[in-house]
Image (tube, rainbow, N blue to C red):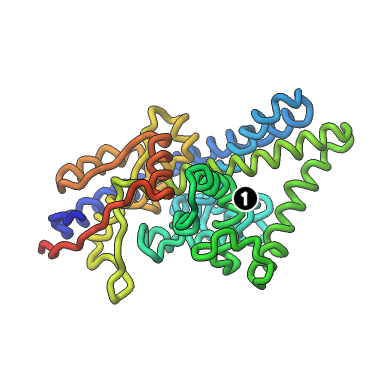
Amino acid sequence: MRSFKVDFNELERDVEELEARLTSEVDISDLRHTKFWEEIGKCCTVSGFILAAFASPWLIPLAALLMVQGMACRAFVAHHTGHSAYDSIPGAEKYSRAIWGVGWRRFIDCFCLQSIEDDRIRHDKHHQFTNTRKDPNALRSSLKIDGVNGKVKREMIFWVGIFTWIWQYYAPSFQDVNTRVRPFAVFNFSMAQTIRYWVYRVLPYVTAHFVLLPLLFAPWGIACVLQVLMARLLADMLLGLYMFSIGVTNHVGKDLYEFSLDTSGTSWDSKGEWYLQQILSTTSFASPNGFTDYLHCFMNYQIEHHLMPNLPPSKYKKAKHEVQLICLRHNIPYTEETIFKRFLRTKDIFLDTRKMKTYVKQNTIR
């Protein structure tokens, strides 16, 4: 346990001054930045399907990886539009929170297992209650392995959980399937919530992605259809691993903190303390250039994002150095490692070989 002696008023002022300055600089170039990477993602998707259908079956894994990058790119745009990152830009109405992926646009913008509207409600709650028991993204609570004997069995539960986490944990929770206390409850068909999830989420998703899309290649023969189906199935498994790596590991590790809720249902008493907790519960990923930023879906700037969630992703690189200076000034650790190291740290926590740190509230410095 560790208590931090931080002047919350000064920390709040430093972060909000930086956010206000960067927000005032948001313009059409930030939208162009996102649209450029969005087009790259579309090219990956198209290339993946063409490669799967018409190339050698040995190239199916490569086709699947291209499909994954395309799907991840749509999730990246959904994430930032959900934070209203482009709402203030003239001419960016399509990328506003109220329009992108909402209603019927879900089927053309980002057709995933959960609706964009549900995902945004959950994600907003994650930002408010990061690393508390109210945090809906605390996946590790759904992979309880108490009583499971043998390293091989424990490892197997972990890996199955990772590759299927969107299907068996993340998406079902939007249909009130309590996957946090009932691991793999998505297969418990005695619950009405589970049936509703399969009927209203899984069935349309499977029909569109694993039936209709492969059948588009039927004029070129059954071999093309089967190869596209195989690539698409593999892509969905890899997408689980990919999204887990960039969306979960940045809040888990023995060097990060968990927080207890007080009687008011919060873990902080001031906005400055909330900023402190966002930094202590989050790690950024080391990334050498813009292309690797894209491969991380710009989630490598996770600390900056949690402090200033409404900024477009193009602003986080500019914010990083100044956020590091703020952390240095207030003697707060700024955690940054490669995504591969963070994955291993996350695995240690999930398998109970390491423990996360516990935050101790301080007497507020006025």
- Toward which corner of the image does residue 285 lie, by quadrant? top left
Q: From the viewer's perspective, is 31 left or right of 278?
A: right
User: Hey, what amino acid is under mark 1?
Assistant: Cys
Q: From the viewer's perspective, is 243 left or right of 338?
A: right
Please state the horizontal and vertical placement of residue 74, each as a whole percent of the image. Answer: 58, 45
Identity of the residue drawn at 70% across and 40% down: 232
Q: Nearer the viewer, residue 106 or 257?
A: 257
Residue 40 visible within the image: yes
Identity of the residue drawn at 27% across and 60% down: 274
Identity of the residue drawn at 56% across and 39% down: 38
Q: Nearer the viewer, residue 81 or 29?
A: 81
Please state the horizontal and vertical placement of residue 250, each as a whole percent of the image. Answer: 39, 46
Identity of the residue drawn at 70% across and 30% down: 60
* Residue sticking out furthest to the left: 366
Q: Residues within 10 Å of mark 1 (few under 14, many from 20)?
A: many
Q: From the viewer's perspective, is 364 left or right of 95?
A: left
Q: From the viewer's perspective, is 59 left or right of 88?
A: right
User: Quadrant location of the N terminus?
Assistant: bottom left
Please state the horizontal and vertical placement of residue 138, each as a whole percent of the image. Answer: 43, 57
* Residue sticking out furthest to the front: 149
- Toward which corner of the image does residue 186 lie, by quadrant? bottom right
Query: On the image, numbered disc 1 is attached to which residue?
Result: 110
Please state the horizontal and vertical placement of residue 202, each as a whole percent of the image. Answer: 69, 57
Q: Nearer the viewer, residue 194 or 22?
A: 194
User: Quadrant location of the C terminus?
Assistant: bottom left
**Which element is circle 1 on?**
loop
